[in-house]
Amino acid sequence: MKVILLAGGFGTRLSEYTDLIPKPMVTVGGRPILWHIMKTYAAYGHKDFYVALGYKAEVVKEYFLNYRALNSDFTVDLGSGAVTPHQADTVDWRVTLVDTGANSMTGGRVRRMKPFVGNETCMLTYGDGVANVDLDALLKFHRSHGKMVTVTAVRPPARFGEMELAGDAVTSFQEKPQLHEGWINGGFFVVEPAFFDLIGGDETILEREPLERAAAMGELRAWRHEGYWQCMDTKRDRDALDDLWSSGKAPWKK
């Protein structure tokens, strides 16, 4: 199934990195977070990617254009120009890179991908969040209800540790758990082609008019993901993800 990845925003809250590179190219464990997201989809057999670019699109294009060289050791014969790879990191992904405009909003970027996706069901997510989401279960749920859009609902992670008290006794202590109250948009959408018609122009924000209209029409369903989910909004988020990956305990690792 085709997968649209939104990778065109400015990432202003990560300016420590995004002055030079787009947010999806900020690395976790030495790899762009976009790569981690794609690995999740690929693990479930979804390897046909359509990346909606904007801010510093050339950085993402150069990464995938030179993917084999950047992710393998090799010998260059400067006389003949021949390149012999060693320990190549080969993936069988198909990656289509589309410049959807530097100033387009999320909805506008999605609409610009319609000619590439065609008249078929597709998956869609943001280029800055990782999760141990079960994509098979998500897709099965989407097909079961027959509606236009499924969004993955997640519980937001706590910024600090959480304690439960009985009087002055601590009955439960959790270090930065997923919160028990409320659900938020975690990305990892499944959408039918009719959804593209709910999106206006480049100025349309995906999370406003299109999804609000789908909800009002009774065409939006939520699939609850109780597992790990984390977006990378700040340097603190990035460092925490990097530490998880380095420890070998990253829940999203495939």
Image (cartoon, grey):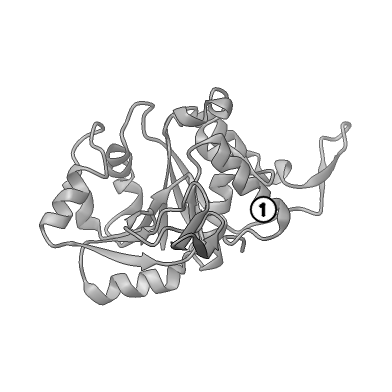
Quarter of the rendering occupied by the C terminus: bottom right
Measured as percent of width and height from the top left, residue 64 is found at 59, 42
Residue shown at the point (59%, 62%) measured from the top left: 251
Residue extending farthest left: 217
Q: Quadrant of residue 100?
A: top left
Residue shown at the point (40%, 51%) measured from the top left: 125
Q: Residues within 10 Å of mark 1 (few under 14, many from 20)?
A: some
The residue under label 1 is 245
One can see residue 197 in this view = no
Dot 1 falls on a residue whose secondary structure is: helix
Number of numbered discs overlaid on the protein picture: 1
Residue shown at the point (69%, 43%) measured from the top left: 30
Measured as percent of width and height from the top left, residue 117 is found at 34, 53
Residue 200, placed above or below residue 221? above
Q: Quadrant of residue 9?
A: top left
* Left or right of residue 75, residue 250 in this image: left
Residue 85, placed above or below residue 102? below
* Left or right of residue 170, residue 115 in this image: left
* Left or right of residue 214, residue 229 in this image: right
Measured as percent of width and height from the top left, residue 51 is found at 45, 44
One can see residue 165 in this view = yes
Q: Quadrant of residue 201?
A: top left
Q: Nearer the viewer, residue 110 or 29?
A: 29
**Amino acid type, label 1:** Trp
Measured as percent of width and height from the top left, residue 193 is found at 24, 57
Residue shown at the point (23%, 36%) measured from the top left: 204
* Left or right of residue 126, residue 151 in this image: left
